[in-house]
Amino acid sequence: MEKIEVEELVKFKMLPFDLYNDNGDKLVNAGEILTSGKLLQISQYENLYKDTPKSPKTTQKNNKPRNKKANENDEIIDGSDSFEKEKPKEIIFDKTVNRKSKIKAQAQVDMKSYFATTMFAMQENSKQDAIQMIGEIKDKILDDVHAVLPDVKYCSQLKLLGNYYDCHSLNTAILVTALGYKLNLDEDYIEKLAKAALLHDIGMLKLPKEILEKTVLSQQDNKIFQTHTQIGYKILKQEMGMPEDICLVALEHHENNDGSGYPFKLSGEQISEMARMVGLCSFFDDLTSNRTPTRIKNTKEALRVMLEVGSKKFTPQLLYQFVNMYNYNDLESYEEMAQ
């Protein structure tokens, strides 16, 4: 048998080999569908081993006629997306680490891989699994951030590096958690902030892939992109049953203090407090990931841009608290931090 990491399993929708634990107990049979719930269960084992069977297993399902419908409202069974011909969905785990981070390198990689697995669960409509996994990531962020805060001198020492969509929601959650601790907010409130940050861009899952891959959006593209806030609210409210204050963060995190944001052009205290905090941290991560028209080289430049934007986008008191959270004079480039 050959050892295999749980991160490698996510690329398979149907497992092509038997899976065992350290004791030789079979956890999953070859041919089983690897749901997000099953992934969550097997991820609890420290070591996993694969063993390809000599003869492939067949199931009764494979003998059913293709394109058969139980009735008009049912999904197609064994149709053009049959498992035999379907190319396995893959998640490529980003192992880039920030060598200057106070968060351990393996913890950085684990956060990204587990978050990618969670988004995979969302796309597979395994929302209850995703809710549980979001809770676990939230707990991990709270523990890690609380542990390293005394040693953090620069904001960049909390940043995850790598693929933007693997890192952005995590970085936003890490930043807003750190801000919550710095402001001595209630622990329950910080937990909500972290969870809301992890889910604030959930509406992106419903946007066309070609929109997300563009670096410059046309006016029409931008209209489509902006719908992710309302889509996210509906997903969290109607499909995941999240509390209203968490749903509002998905809806309002692009609203601006001066009323120039979207989707409703809210201003000032019309924007929920959690949305203001998450929106600020989200914008900062966009800046430091060079996802805005303004290109920056380091955290110092990013903080300068934040101050220049000022009260147009952010509540002045909140912006002041964020800018003064860590040492301002952070000059190391993000390229230099990556391994």
Image (cartoon, rainbow, N blue to C red):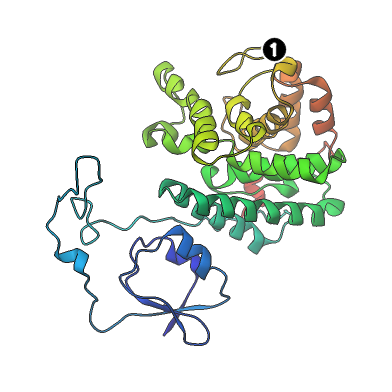
For the residue pair 337 and 11, the one nearer the viewer reads as 11
Question: Residue visible at 79% across and 26% down?
Answer: 319
Outermost bottom residue: 23
Q: Is residue 56 left or right of residue 37?
A: left
Q: List the residue tagged with mark 1.
A: 258
- Is residue 162 at least partly visible in the picture? yes
User: Is 66 located above or below residue 16 in the figure?
Assistant: above
Q: Quadrant of the C terminus?
A: bottom right
Q: Residue 161 in the image: x percent, y percent?
A: 61, 49
Q: Quadrant of residue 86?
A: bottom left
User: Is 111 located above or below residue 229 in the figure?
Assistant: below
Outermost left residue: 65
Question: Residue visible at 43% across and 66% down?
Answer: 9
Q: Is residue 19 left or right of residue 290?
A: left
- Is residue 333 at least partly visible in the picture? no
Question: Residue visible at 60% across and 50% down?
Answer: 134
Q: Quadrant of residue 266?
A: top right
Q: Residue 85 in the image: x percent, y percent?
A: 20, 58
Outermost front residue: 71
Query: Element under label 1?
Result: loop
Q: Residue 44 in the image: x percent, y percent?
A: 57, 70
Q: What kind of residue is marked 1? A: Asp
User: Is 36 located above or below residue 269 in the figure?
Assistant: below
Label 1 Cα crowd, 10 Å radius (few <14 / some 14-19 / many 20+): some
Q: Quadrant of residue 103?
A: bottom right
For the residue pair 230 and 168, the one nearer the viewer reads as 230
Q: Residue 219 in the image: x percent, y percent?
A: 43, 16
